[in-house]
Image (cartoon, coloured by chain):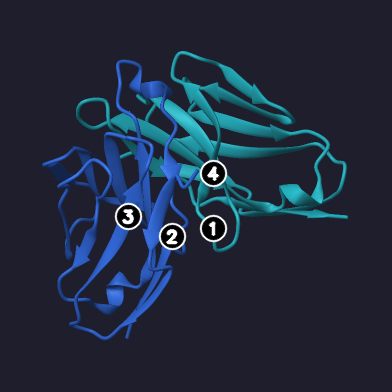
Amino acid sequence: KQEVTQIPAALSVPEGENLVLNCSFTDSAIYNLQWFRQDPGKGLTSLLLIQSSQREQTSGRLNASLDKSSGRSTLYIAASQPGDSATYLCAVSRELIQGAQKLVFGQGTGLTINP
Amino acid sequence: NAGVTQTPKFQVLKTGQSMTLQCAQDMNHEYMSWYRQDPGMGLRLIHYSVGAGITDQGEVPNGYNVSRSTTEDFPLRLLSAAPSQTSVYFCASSHLGRAATNEKLFFGSGTQLSVL
């Protein structure tokens, strides 16, 4: 059974710092890995998707890496801003039927950026 | 630009009551799914559908029914609510396709359900 773990559970840093969020998974047979952002009382917003054949993806100040062999992914946030404060969720997918994906989520890292 | 719309946003039920959580998407997505989010458990898949008339069970289907009569709508029914079903429910959708691994999942804003 796939298990996804995110460390740390919570992180508080001053504005402007670069930071890394960690995600590990137990089964390397994944189709992709996604990082989501969740704001309080809101849904999840997909930030980055890394296909199983890829090593990393970048979007603006965000960079996500994937190492399937070790079962690890990192989300790097450069020059953090107070608006980055949110819960960040990592999820790995496997195929259900006809290309539909089942996502297995980690429990998230709650990030607070202090002005 | 609605995306995935869930109603209601909040609901309180008594044990044994029934209700339907609504989910609609306007992106012509073939795949729709329901997740529940519980503290310490993360998000878990309840049911999913790959098209009208096609549904299947996810990880935690007991106590829930679904149907998919149109591409746009995927309601989740609680037949007899139990306190264990207190949770935040999210509907999510995406395209299916030859490159399905490229498809990001779009989430609704959630329904917070309390069963007393």
Please tell me which residue is depicted at 87% across the width and 42% down the height of the picture. Answer: A16
Find residue B6 and report its horizontal and vertical position in percent: 38, 58
- Within 10 Å of disc 1 (Cα), the crowding (few <14, some 14-19, many 20+) is some
> Does mark 4 fall on the same chain as mark 2?
no
Q: Residue furthest front?
A: B1
Which residue is tagged 2? B110
Task: Report the side of A1 relative to A12 (left or right).
Answer: left
At mark 4, the secondary structure is strand
Which residue is tagged 1? A42
- Within 10 Å of disc 2 (Cα), the crowding (few <14, some 14-19, many 20+) is many
> Does mark 2 fall on the same chain as mark 3?
yes
Q: Split into 4 quadrants, where in the image is the C terminus of chain A?
A: bottom right
Q: Chain of mark 1?
A: A
Q: Are marks 2 and 1 in contact (CB under 8 Å)?
A: yes
Alpha carbons under labels 3 and 1: distance apart = 15 Å
In front: mark 3 or mark 2?
Answer: 3
> Does mark 1 fall on the same chain as mark 3?
no
Q: Are marks 3 and 4 in contact (CB under 8 Å)?
A: no
Please tell me which residue is depicted at 37% across the width and 46% down the height of the picture. Answer: B92
Which residue is tagged 3? B23
Quarter of the rendering containing residue B5: bottom left
Residue A104 can be seen, yes or no: yes
Which residue is tagged 4? A45
> Does mark 1 fall on the same chain as mark 4?
yes
At mark 2, the secondary structure is loop
Alpha carbons under labels 2 and 4: distance apart = 12 Å
Alpha carbons under labels 4 and 1: distance apart = 9 Å
Q: Colour of chain B?
A: blue
Q: Colour of chain A?
A: cyan
Task: Report the side of B83 relative to A7 (left or right).
Answer: left
Q: Nearer the viewer, residue A57 or B25?
A: B25
